[in-house]
Each structure stands twice: as C-alpha cells, then as structure tokens.
Image (spheres, coloured by chain):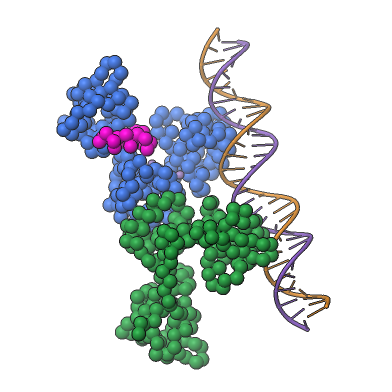
Chain colours: A blue, B green, C purple, D orange
DNA sequence: TACTATATTTAGTCTTAGCTAAATATTTGT
DNA sequence: ACAAATATTTAGCTAAGACTAAATATAGTA
C-alpha cells in the first residue's frame, strides 16, 4: 500500500460512514482536495486490487479488505494523536497534520508498542474511537448538543468538526472533553443555546452546539 | 525536500565523512542500492537547488545548506532510534528500518518535543552522536578495538557496523555498549584477540574487533 | 419524454524517480 | 604515452500519481 492509496481508502471509509450509499467520485475529490479525474484513476487501481467495489458511474464502496486497511490507518492516526498530546504535550488542534504523516509509517511492532505505552487508549484527543488491532470499535451512544432538549444534558465526549479553528475556539471558551453540560434555554430566534457548563453559564451558537457530542446522563 | 532528496543528501554526508574528497557517483549508487545513472540525475537536481557542489565527472560534495539538511535528517533518525529503544523496548538491531521511515516526518515541534521527552540524549543506541538543533556534534575520541595494543583497553562506546546480524551477534556474546574491555592477547596468525570483558575473558575475531569503538581510559 | 445541468470518465500531458543501453570521460597499467 | 579498463553521463523508456480539456453518462425538470 502506497501512502496515496492509504489516503484514498481512509477517505472512502470516512465518507461512507455517514449515509451508507456508494461513495461518489466527486465527494472523494472534494474531501481530498484533488480532481475527480484523478479519483477515477485511483479508484480503478484500488478496484484492481480488490480494495473497493467499483462500477463505472455507480460510485465506490470498500471491500472487506479495504475496510480492514482503512481501520488500520485510522488506528495508527488516532494512536499517534494520543501520543502527541499525552507524551509530547501537543494541543488537540496541532496533532492532526503530524498524525497525517505518521499514520503511514509501516511497522506492526511500532504501533503495538505505542498502544502499550499509551495504555491502550479507547479514544483519541477529539473523542474519536480508536479501533483495536482487529478493527473493533467502541461505539458510544452520543448525540449532538444541538439535539439535546431543554433541561437535558450530559458529558461532552467528542467534537464533530475537529478543525484547528474550532478547537482553538473551544479552548478559548473553556469548553473541553469531559465537561458536564446542561441545556438551560434554546433561543427561538437563532437557535443559540444557554448552557450550564460546570459551575458557569454560557451562551453558544447553534453552530457550536451542532459540533459537540454529548453522552447523555445514564438514568 | 522530498524523501528521496533527503536520502541522497544523507548518503552523501555519510560517505563524505570518511575520506574527504568529493563523493563519487558510483559510491552513492552502491550505498543506496540504485544505479549510477539515477544518481547523476538526482545530483543534478540537488546542484540546481544549491544543496551540493557538482562538476561533471568530478564527484559531488555538500554545500553549507546541504550539510545542514543532512544533519537535520540524521538528528531525526537517531532521536527516533533512541525513542524506539527507550520508550518502546525495541532492541538495537530492530530500530534502523523504522527510523529510516520516521526520519522523514516533517515537524520541528515534533522533533524538539521528542528530544525533550528523551532528556536530550547525546548518543543513539549504536553509540553514534546525535546532532543538536543547530547541527552541533559531540565528537568523542574513540578508537577501534582492533587498534588497541595489548595491555590497553577502555569502554565500548559504539559499533561501526550496525547491521542487525552484527548486533545480534554481539547480544548473543554478551558484548554491549558500556562494557569495559581489555586487550589481553593478539594472535599473530589470524589477528584474533583475547579480551577481558567485565569479569570474563573471550576470544574474538579481528573482524569483530574492527567494528567496536573503544573510548580509552583517561589517564 | 426530452432537454439541460451535473457527475463521471477518457484521452492526453506533466513531474518525480527510477531503469537500460550507448556514448563519453577519466584513470590505470604497460 | 597510449590502450584498456573503469567511471560517468546521456538518451530514451517506464510507472505512479497528479492535471486539463473533451467526451459521455446520469439525474433533474419542464
Ligand atoms: Mn486527526
Ligand atoms: Mn495521510
Ligand atoms: Mn482525531
Ligand atoms: Mn543508529
């Protein structure tokens, strides 16, 4: 597997998660910041290697093998992100780019030992689950803060948008993973929310709420 | 800098160390397991970028800039090797291949933090010095065990050949960095040596002795 | 249903980094 | 000093992975 092939497979996996129809050529091109024609070329090569199912004009989906590889790359990406934060004191908005490179390093032993060093973490710094060696996931049932009704609440366990700008914004506003959040009011006018976070209260836009995952309080 | 360019620069640096004439096309090709014609192509490109001095048929040498880059890559390589051994319990014969990949990861912050995590090591697992951020070296005055006269000795501080097979051989024979070694006898016939190592005595071939660096006892 | 807009593929080109075979320069031995 | 051996470069080819422009298929709409 070349670096480029791995990036395609990973992208197809990510797009495929939400909405389970076949993934379109254009959506891959957009996500990878490349051109549709380049995608077509690569997709043909991946189909040749039995990593994707592909029928001209009908989009593409991962085969069993492709899925396995995607999960392997994602595992590496997220473990490296944990490493950068836990061992090298990177902040959560700095890790993605570096992990994008590190995810392509080839050594099973390296990744197993890294996993051990980090004490087998289940989630990465953005709250995304880390597949285990066999591709097994920890599915957490979580809900976007924007879906929580007034009076409800829970613990903030992840972000949907993990762009540096969003993450920095959260830092600036003292919102982080592990925080207890209550929805106190929802504004009719613009959908903004008044939330209780720890001891404090804050007004946040709908946009923000739509990018925070909440694990509802067990009852 | 592409990965390939970095590898060429690094190789030119290493060959240039021993014997300070210009480095020949063929020697680069041999070292990199590639063809002389490919080397010529790449060397032209590097000359274009002012990383090497190159005159047709006259060999090649690194410019100031090329030297800087070589030292940067070597620094990364050796720091990663230390990381693998110290933090992930790799053995010294397993680290090279992985470091060969890791040395091309691009992030100044990453390498600085790694350096800090490892407590600013001065030498890698094979006893090779690690350049600091500015390319500064710790030159140690060391000598091959094969050059030590009978009666002399010191501490084993490095290996010249760091192939896995040699390193495994040393492990098997309980010879490692930090060991105190005395030359007790040198056999006329085949140049083999009787050495005192710690409390024990051992017979080793000239070949072995010619690949162990010794720091002579201060007097 | 037919026309138009959009999505996708094809054809042809480019760059990087390799290769082989042939040409040319340098070095060595007599 | 010169011929032979060796080293190096040039010329031309290849594959991966991109791109643009043109062709074609699909989808949406009147
Ligand atoms: Mn990431
Ligand atoms: Mn990547
Ligand atoms: Mn992440
Ligand atoms: Mn080393």
Q: Residue at x 32, y 44 (%)?
A: A91
Left/right placement of residue B59 relative to residue A140 reads: right
**Residue range corresponding to the magenta coloring:** A158-175
Q: Residue at x 16, y 31 (%)?
A: A219
x, y percent for residue A4: 51, 44
In which quarter of the view is residue B135 placed? bottom left
Membership of A163 in magenta stretch:
yes
Residue B139 in sight from this viewpoint: yes
In which quarter of the view is residue B62 placed? bottom right
In which quarter of the view is residue A142 placed? top left
Identify which residue, B180 or A56, lies in the foreground.
B180
Left/right placement of residue A67 relative to residue A130 reads: right
Identify which residue, B203 or B216, lies in the foreground.
B216
x, y percent for residue B167: 43, 71
Q: Residue at x 39, y 52 (%)?
A: B110
Answer with the quadrant where ligand 1 appears in the image: top left
Going by the picture, which residue comes out furthest to the bottom?
Answer: B188
Indicate the quadrant containing the C terminus of chain B: top left, top right, bottom left or bottom right.
bottom left
In this figure, what is the number of numbered marks?
0
Identify which residue, B2 or B58, lies in the foreground.
B58
Membership of B86 in magenta stretch:
no
x, y percent for residue A109: 39, 57
x, y percent for residue B54: 64, 61
Identify which residue, A190 or B34, lies in the foreground.
A190
Check the image and report above or below for A66 versus B110. above
Q: Residue at x 19, y 28 (%)?
A: A201
Check the image and report above or below for A157 versus D25. below
Left/right placement of residue B105 relative to residue A123 reads: right
Left/right placement of residue A210 relative to residue C10 reads: left
Residue A59 in sight from this viewpoint: no
């Amino acid at each position: 597997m070349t670096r480029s092939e791995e990036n395609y497979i990973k992208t197809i996996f990510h797009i495929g998660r939400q909405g389970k129809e076949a993934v379109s050529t254009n959506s891959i091109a957009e996500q990878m910041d490349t051109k549709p024609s380049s995608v077509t070329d690569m997709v043909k090569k991946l189909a040749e290697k039995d990593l994707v199912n592909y029928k001209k004009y009908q989009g593409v989906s991962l085969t069993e093998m492709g899925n396995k590889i995607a999960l392997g790359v994602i595992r590496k990406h997220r473990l490296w992100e944990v490493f950068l934060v836990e061992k090298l004191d990177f902040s959560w908005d700095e890790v993605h780019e570096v992990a994008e490179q590190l995810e392509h390093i080839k050594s099973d032993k390296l990744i197993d030992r890294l996993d051990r060093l980090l004490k087998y973490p289940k989630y990465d710094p953005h709250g995304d689950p880390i597949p285990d060696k066999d591709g097994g996931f920890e599915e957490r049932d979580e809900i976007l803060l924007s879906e929580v009704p007034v009076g409800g609440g829970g613990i903030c366990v992840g972000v949907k948008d993990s762009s540096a700008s969003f993450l920095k914004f959260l830092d600036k506003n003292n919102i982080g993973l592990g925080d207890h959040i209550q929805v106190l009011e929802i504004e009719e006018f613009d959908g903004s929310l008044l939330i209780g976070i720890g001891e404090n209260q804050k007004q946040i836009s709908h946009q923000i709420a739509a990018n925070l995952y909440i694990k509802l309080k067990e009852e």
